[in-house]
Image (cartoon, helix red, strand yellow):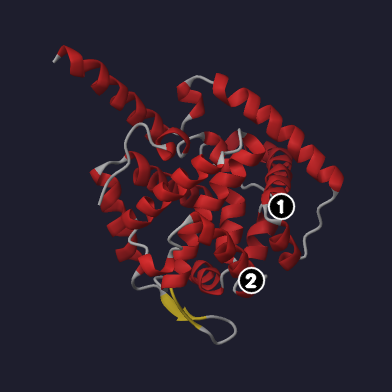
Amino acid sequence: MEAFHPGTIHWDTAGEYRNLLVAGSALVLQTMHPAVGAAVAEHSTYKQDPWGRLNRTLTSVQKWVYGGAEGIEEGRRLREIHAPISGTDEQGRSYHALNGEAYAWVHLTLFERYITLHRYFGTPYSAEQERALYAESQQLGRILRVPGREVPPTIEEFWPYFDEMIAERLEPHPTALEVLATMRGTPVPPMVPRVLRRLWAPVGMGSGEFNHFVTVGTLPPAVREVLGLSWSARDERRLRRLGRAVAALTPHLPERARYLPVAYRARRAARRRRELSPAQ
């Protein structure tokens, strides 16, 4: 099982802060799968501790790509902690967090979200880059111990799979709808001093409306239709303008401001190893 290394597409992009722009839509896509939606509703702490849950998720995701051997261990750990998660949903359907189809869907939505992120907020990938990214996504699936039989073997087979999942397996699950609803009011971050917390309401509302707008806009049109979400041509133009601004700004940001902490430290350490190697 091979860990990620400098020079891969994931190494250069997976740790960027702009990935947060599609984090909400990824969660919506994932929780529209009935098994995932039920498991998240009954076992996740995202409602009681949203900021803590986000921080733990981001740390885990960064380890997959930037953690080396630690990333491979993180994949094993995730399988272990999901193993006991099972139950029966509100419709009487049994679910298990390690259901092969559901586990693969959660993983594969990340590949599709990378494509969407760069279509809106960066430079769209070429066909060759998409193919390379998909091969890396399969590598990531092995790290996460996703059943190989559930992963389309080629990118040409991925897109029909993705469309079929939307048409036949996804649903307007209450968890996905709740995720969308709660986005409209961003909770107070724990680091905000108590004296300033009363001032958070307008900030949280504005941030929430922004997150909701970007999340709805970056969802596939077929998914918006399943969820009953409206999206106008004017909305699309606004999102495209925002995307062009993010795409223009991102390459000029200092590395510390462009990458999440785990990614930044890993990239800096890798660069130092390369610089020391000739001297040694």
Residue tagged by mark 2? 173
Q: Position of residue 4 (x, y in %)?
A: 32, 41
Cα–Cα gap, marks 1 and 2: 15 Å
Which residue is drawn at the image coordinates 39% and 34% (left, top)?
263
Query: What type is the residue that disc 1 sits on?
Result: Val
How would you rate the neighbour count of disc 1 (Cα within 10 Å): few for under 14, some for 14-19, many for 20 or more? many
- Rendered residue at 86%/43% (across/down): 234
What type is the residue that disc 2 sits on? His
Q: Is residue 260 left or right of residue 90?
A: left
Local SS, label 2: loop
Label of residue 186 in the image? none
Which residue is labeled 1 in the image? 216
Q: Residue at x 36, y 42 (%)?
A: 65
Task: Decide if residue 164 is on the left or right side of residue 96.
Answer: right
Residue 114: x, y in percent?
54, 45
In the depicted view, which residue is nearer to us: 196 or 38? 38
Residue 210 location, quadrant: top right
Q: Is residue 120 above or below residue 73?
A: above
- Is 71 left or right of 222, judged from the image as shown? left
Circle 1 — which element?
A: helix
Tell me if residue 188 can be seen.
no
Q: Is residue 20 above or below residue 273?
A: below
Residue plotted at (29% across, 27% down)? 270
Q: Is residue 161 visible?
A: yes
Whichever of labels 1 and 2 marks the residue nearer the N terminus, that label is 2
Front-most of residues 81 and 150: 150
Residue 213 in picture, x, y percent from top left: 73, 47
Q: Residue furthest bottom?
A: 92
For label 2, count other residues whose C-alpha is less than 10 Å away and answer few (under 14), some (14-19) or many (20+).
some
**In the image, is 137 to the left or to the right of 90?**
left
